[in-house]
Image (cartoon, grey):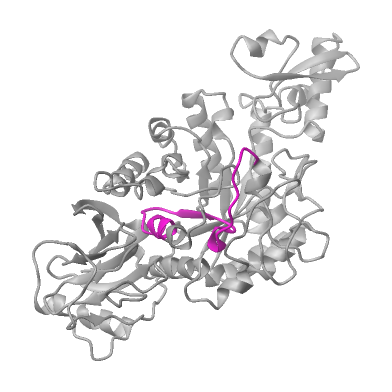
Amino acid sequence: MAYSKKTLLGMLGIAGLLLSSCAQPSSSTGASSSTSTSSSSAVLDEKGLTDDILDDEYRNYYEIFVYSYADSDGDGIGDLNGITQKLSYIRSLGFTGIWLTPIFESPTYHKYNATDYFTVDSQFGTNDDLKTLVDTAHDDGIKVILDLALNHSSTENEWFQESVNAFAKEELGGFSLTDEEKEEASLYSLSTSAATFADDGKGYQTYSTQYGNVYYECNFGSGSDMPEFNFDSSYTWEKFESIIAYWEQDYAVDGFRLDAVKYYYLDDTADNITALSKIKSLADEYSLDGKAYVVGECWDSQGVIEKYYESTMDSYFWFPGQGSTGFIIASTNNTGTNNKALATGQAAMGEASGSNISAPFLDNHDTSRFSGANASTNKFRYGLLSTLSGNTFTYYGDEIGINGSGDSDANYRTYMDWGDGMETNGAPNGTATYPFGSVADQQDDPDSILNYVKKANEIRNALPGIARGSQASYEKIGKRGLVIDKTYTGQDIQIVYNYSDTDNLDFTPDSGYEFYYALTASKADNDSGIYGGVAEGEDGSYVIPPLGIGYFVD
């Protein structure tokens, strides 16, 4: 939608402030680095923001590693009731969707190898607890997607034990099978010879039966407890359909995050695309809303992910954007040559996803946390993410700056520091640091990382064109500045970034654009006296503080 000047002034509550950018329009952007502003400049006050949440599949998602998040019963393990109690907190930060890591019965703490796809693991609660969580989340305007590992289960799953025993009965024992046993035998990828898998570069393990050893495909994780399903079996697809239908129809979940999609058919992109389209079709068929949101984990390069978008899936996580080498953080490591990286990275992401929904993120449960020792840097990194098109995914604890790194999944999955007694013991043997304090420490501090994340999401929710808009153009400004133009159904947005952590950035928006809001990461006042906002000059220019992001709307 387009915003008139009158509408904007009313929404933002600017009292007695005439935005001179409209009275004295400029036809081009321009900037210079400086540490002073003329005395006639006015520092713009903070304004109110109003949600404009559309009824579509775009959301700000919050990933919760359930085991480590919030403990409601004092056993040191996170649970669904703990998440339910934190839903108001999650929504207050501007998150409108949550992704729960696996919650099904499993012998491991991470639950990515299910023994029963229809039962919530008792460590996390009950099926009724999930129903309560989803219903409460929906009341709060939050969608819920479940993590679904369909590439493999646990060897302790009754389905696997029935399958491997039926297979061995026929192939090793020489017995005829009933029709039911034939279906069971086809459910997993099994063989009487290790060469069946080794010759194709696949992993395998052995399983002992009364008839002898059976080899099963096992490509994922260490150890032997992740046998791969046989995606060529119609019986496998009957099982998948029953899982999807159960959680969507009976528990009203809004969709799924699909784990390790390259492992359905190991590195066979064409067959994986076919399988993913089938899963997406089933999810839509059984969704109570008629359309589910399904996002896949294809941990690979831009070219491979772009190929996967030939499926009918909604999204794939954009791995070229995450981590210290991803385009989001890499865009900050510049001295003038790289300050277009955010724009070119966003353009590549948009080109790959096409009419689908991009899914940028900074970290997750399998990667080092993006947070470092500097609060302002952490804020700015998150601010960059929050301006990108698509659905953003934020990992729990990033809003308080948890530092977890090293070659250890457990270090990425440590406890959430609430400061209210609902802390868990975190992942077994995991260690991390909490340099900026707990949620309780940060909630009332306007300069905290937590409140910066909240503001970034609030701006994103108030301007639908940020997530849904396409990048129309970009322009480098000096050595450390960048402006990106987005368009969305008549709403044009200019977002200007000051990558410098020391100097102001003078910026003149294009004709017709009005100042909307700003994010500023720097805590200390700079020499110009600007603190927490943008200054407006009488010549239609604006001063963006160090590590600041300004939003202008036409």
Given the current orientation, which residue lies at the most extreme right position? 210
Quadrant of res 34? bottom left
Which residue lies at the image location 35% right of the left edge and 76% below the top edge?
531
Residue 178 appears in the rendering: no
Q: Residue at x 38, y 56 (%)?
A: 384
Q: Is residue 214 left or right of residue 22?
A: right
Front in this rendered view, residue 168 or 472: 472
Foreground of the two, 522 or 352: 522
Is residue 256 something that shows in the picture? yes
Was residue 146 drawn as part of the magenta stretch in this picture? no
Q: Position of residue 154 (x, y in %)?
A: 76, 34
Q: Is residue 49 above or below residue 154?
A: below
Is residue 406 rendered magenta in the image? yes
Give left or right: position of 341 versus 237: left
| Vertical comparison of 276 with 527: above or below | above
Q: Is residue 30 above or below residue 191?
A: below
Q: Quadrant of the N terminus?
A: bottom left
Residue 74 place in picture, x, y as percent: 82, 64
In the rendered structure, which segment of residues is drawn in magenta? 380-408
Q: Is residue 206 left or right of residue 385?
A: right
Q: Is residue 191 left or right of residue 253?
A: right
Question: Of all residues shown, which one is farthest toward the front?
Answer: 527
Position in image of residue 322 (x %, y %): 46, 44
Image quarter for residue 172?
top right
